[in-house]
Image (cartoon, rainbow, N blue to C red):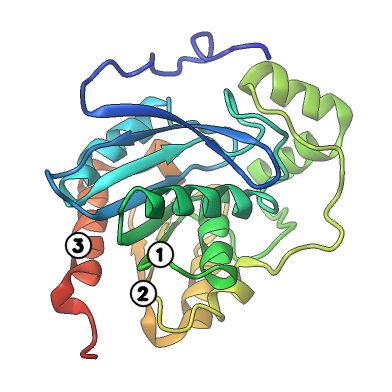
C-alpha cells in the first residue's frame, strides 16, 4: 500500500515515551492503525477519538486534541478502515461502527473501565450509532456531526458526494488524501445519526457544533440533541467551523471538563 503520510503533511511517528503505537484487528479481518496516549498514572478511564472522513490520528490537530484530553484519562486514537495506514476500504460511516467496537473491546481487555467516545464529523455519526447499537460506553461526544444521511445542502457536501460516488472521485481521494473508498452503495442504509441518538437511553451525550460550520448547518446538531432527550446537552459555538481542524484549545478543554464531570464516580446514579 502506498504511503502518502509525509507528502500530505501528516505528523511523523511519535517518539515520545507516552505514545504507544498499535495495530487493532476487527472481526472482519481489517487491521487498524492506532496509538494510545497514556493518561494519569493508574487511570482506568479512556477517551477514544473518532476522526472525520480523510483525517488521521497522525495529523497534528488530532494529536493536539489528544494531548489536551489526556489529563482526564488515556486517549486512544486510530484510523478508520480505508484511511492511510489502516487496511480495508472506507464505507463512509457504515462498517466503521465495527472499527470503533473493536477499539472499545481492545481497551476493555486492557483494563479500562470508563470509556468515552468523542467523534468528529463522520466520526460523530459513528459514535452515535455505536452507542445505540453496541452500548458499553460511559458517555458520547458528537462534534460537527451530520443529523441525516445524503445531505447535499452545502458545497463541501456536494463535493464529498461526488468524490465517493464516482470512480474519478475515488481515485482523487486515494491519490490526494490516502483514503480508499468502497465502490458499493449502502444497501440497506444504516439508521441515521438522529435516529441513533433517540436510542441512546440514559447514556450522557454532548453535541457540539459551530455556527460557522460550512459542512452542516446547526439544525443538524439541534435535531440530534432533541432526539436524544433529557440526557443530551447542546453547545452551539460562535465562530467555530468544522471538526478537528477548526476546534480551539479552549473548546477541547471544556469538552474534557464535561467528560470528567459525567464520568466521575460522584456523577453516577445511586445503585
State the residue position of label 1. Answer: 140
Please provide percent x and percent y for residue 167. 87, 29
Residue drawn 45% across the image and 85% down it: 229
* Relative side of 233 to 128, left or right: left
Characterize the local packing of mark 2: few (<14), some (14-19) or many (20 or more) Cα atoms within 10 angstroms. Answer: many
Q: Percent from the top left, x then y, of residue 47?
A: 33, 51
Q: Which quadrant does the C terminus fall into?
A: bottom left
Regarding residue 152, the answer to whether it shows in the image is yes
- Figure check: 104 above or below 200: above
**As rendered, which of 120 and 204 lies closer to the eye?**
204
Q: Identify the disc placed on residue 204.
A: 2
Res 260 label: 3
Q: CA distance from mark 1 to mark 3?
A: 12 Å
Say whether marks 3 and 2 touch (CB < 8 Å): no
Q: Name the secondary structure under disc 1.
A: strand
Taking the image as drawn, is residue 241 in sight?
no
Query: Badges 2 and 1: C-beta atoms under 8 Å apart?
Result: yes
Badge 1 density bin: few <14, some 14–19, many ≥20, Cα 10 Å = many
Amino acid at each position: 500500500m502506498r504511503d502518502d503520510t509525509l507528502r500530505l503533511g501528516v505528523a511523523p511517528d511519535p517518539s515520545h515515551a507516552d505514545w504507544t503505537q498499535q495495530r487493532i484487528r476487527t472481526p472482519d479481518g481489517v487491521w487498524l492503525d492506532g496509538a494510545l496516549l497514556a493518561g494519569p498514572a493508574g487511570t482506568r478511564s479512556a477517551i477514544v477519538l473518532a476522526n472525520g472522513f480523510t483525517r488521521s490520528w497522525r495529523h497534528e490537530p488530532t494529536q493536539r486534541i489528544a494531548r489536551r484530553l489526556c489529563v482526564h484519562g488515556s486517549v486512544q486514537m486510530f484510523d478508520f478502515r480505508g484511511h492511510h495506514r489502516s487496511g480495508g476500504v472506507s464505507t463512509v460511516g457504515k462498517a466503521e461502527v465495527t472499527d470503533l467496537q473493536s477499539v472499545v473491546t481492545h481497551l476493555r481487555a486492557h483494563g479500562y473501565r470508563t470509556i468515552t467516545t468523542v467523534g468528529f464529523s463522520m466520526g460523530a455519526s459513528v459514535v452515535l450509532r455505536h452507542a445505540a447499537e453496541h452500548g458499553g460506553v460511559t458517555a458520547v461526544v458528537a462534534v460537527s456531526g451530520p443529523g441525516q444521511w445524503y445531505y447535499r445542502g452545502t458545497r463541501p457536501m456536494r463535493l464529498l458526494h461526488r468524490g465517493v460516488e464516482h470512480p474519478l472521485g475515488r481515485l482523487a481521494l486515494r491519490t490526494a488524501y490516502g483514503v480508499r473508498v468502497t465502490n458499493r452503495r449502502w444497501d440497506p442504509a444504516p439508521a441515521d445519526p438522529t435516529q441513533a441518538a433517540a436510542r441512546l437511553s440514559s447514556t450522557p451525550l454532548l453535541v457540539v457544533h459551530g455556527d460557522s460550520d460550512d459542512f452542516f448547518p446547526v439544525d443538524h446538531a439541534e435535531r440530534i440533541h432533541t432526539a436524544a432527550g433529557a440526557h443530551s446537552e447542546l453547545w452551539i459555538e460562535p465562530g467555530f467551523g468544522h471538526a478537528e481542524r477548526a476546534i480551539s484549545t479552549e473548546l477541547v478543554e471544556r469538552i474534557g471538563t464535561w467528560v470528567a464531570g459525567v464520568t466521575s464516580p460522584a456523577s453516577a446514579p445511586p445503585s
